[in-house]
Amino acid sequence: MSLTSEFKQSLKTVDSEEILDLVIFRPLSFVLVKLIYSTNITPNQISSVALIFGILSGVLYGFGTYEFLLLGSASFFICNTLDCMDGQLARLKKNGTKIGRVIDGFIDYTTSVSVFLGLGIAMTKITGDPIYSWILTVAAGISKALQNMLFDNYRNLYLEIAYGKASDIDAEILEYSEEWDRLNREGGSFTDKLLVRSYIGYSKIQKKLTKHLTLNATAQSYKEKNKLILRLWSWIGSTTHMVALIVCAVFNRIDIYLILTVTIGNLIMIILKLWQDKILKEFKPVN
């Protein structure tokens, strides 16, 4: 197998990856995966190190000085590289686990909370105005979460219909409920049980908040109609946000990142949501 083919095999799919992941982080993490492929290092071990760097990013950002903003950005860069690396290793070795998928999501949420807490503290120190700083930071944090959530939802729908690679939410709940039963039968660790139980609870909440879509679409027709808009959705994905924050930190203007997230980011989200709804309407069954 050629390196190009192996690289593609390490991805979810080329057309569902974020652009900046494809051109920066996935190639870099693929090189690292190749270096440790023959070792006993597991995807979950890599995830654990990624979590440490994710939390460290927020701590470093919180100091607020230019030097620490750069250090926080470097830590964030490493976190994202490792976060890409664990999934690529799991796909190449075919040793991914249900717990690993939960851990991966847990890292994303924990890192995001840590980074925005750090940014809020940093902004307070930089501006001397805690009210303005925290209102802007919280608004940006909520905006980022919504933008990332919509991108992830439509990417999962795309993977499910176009590639058959994702389960619907009912199947996810059933799958992890079975994993919960297995852990209880086999005496699984407290941490694994806690993660699985938390994921089941999160999925049930998501089910209540997410409108179930019944679509009349073939894989090819859905892919043709949604390939472009999914690529556009990826520009408000988590990696784009991370790179934008790093660039703004390099110029010592993290406030610009927060303002752009609340303004331009939300404008893009609204436009894409209206467009996406129009596309999905074409695939809804006629009653």
Image: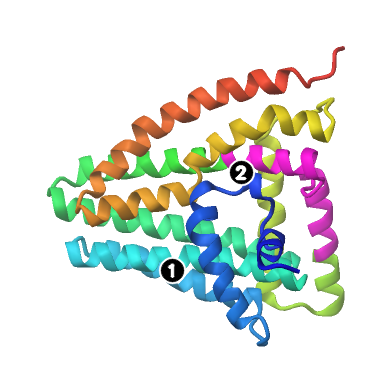
Residue 268 placement: quadrant: top left
Q: Position of residue 168 (x, y in %)?
A: 79, 43
Question: Is disc 1 surrounded by few (<14), some (14 to 19) or many (20+) residues within 10 Å?
Answer: some
Question: Is disc 2 surrounded by few (<14), some (14 to 19) or many (20+) residues within 10 Å?
Answer: some
Q: In the image, which residues are magenta?
A: 151-179
Q: Position of residue 48 (x, y in %)?
A: 55, 74
Q: Is residue 211 left or right of residue 53?
A: right
Residue 282 placement: quadrant: top right
Please give the name of the residue rendered at 82% of the width and 35% of the height, measured from the top-left corner: 219
Q: Is residue 155 magenta?
A: yes
Q: Given the current orientation, which residue lies at the most extreme bottom position?
A: 39
Q: Tell me which secondary structure the magenta stretch mostly adopts.
A: helix
What SS does tag 1 mark? Answer: helix
Q: Nearer the viewer, mark 1 or mark 2?
A: 1
Question: Which residue corresponds to mark 2?
Answer: 152
Q: How many marks?
A: 2
Question: Which residue corresponds to mark 1?
Answer: 78
Q: Position of residue 23 (x, y in %)?
A: 50, 54
Residue 102 placement: quadrant: bottom right
> Which colouring convention does the figure follow?
rainbow
Q: Earlier in the sequence, mark 1 or mark 2?
A: 1
Q: Is residue 127 something one can see in this rendering?
A: yes
What SS does tag 2 mark? Answer: helix
Please give the name of the residue rendered at 49% of the width and 25% of the height, measured from the top-left corner: 270
Determine which of the numbered discs, if any, sits on residue 163 in the image.
none
Quarter of the figure with the N terminus: bottom right
Q: Is residue 79 magenta?
A: no
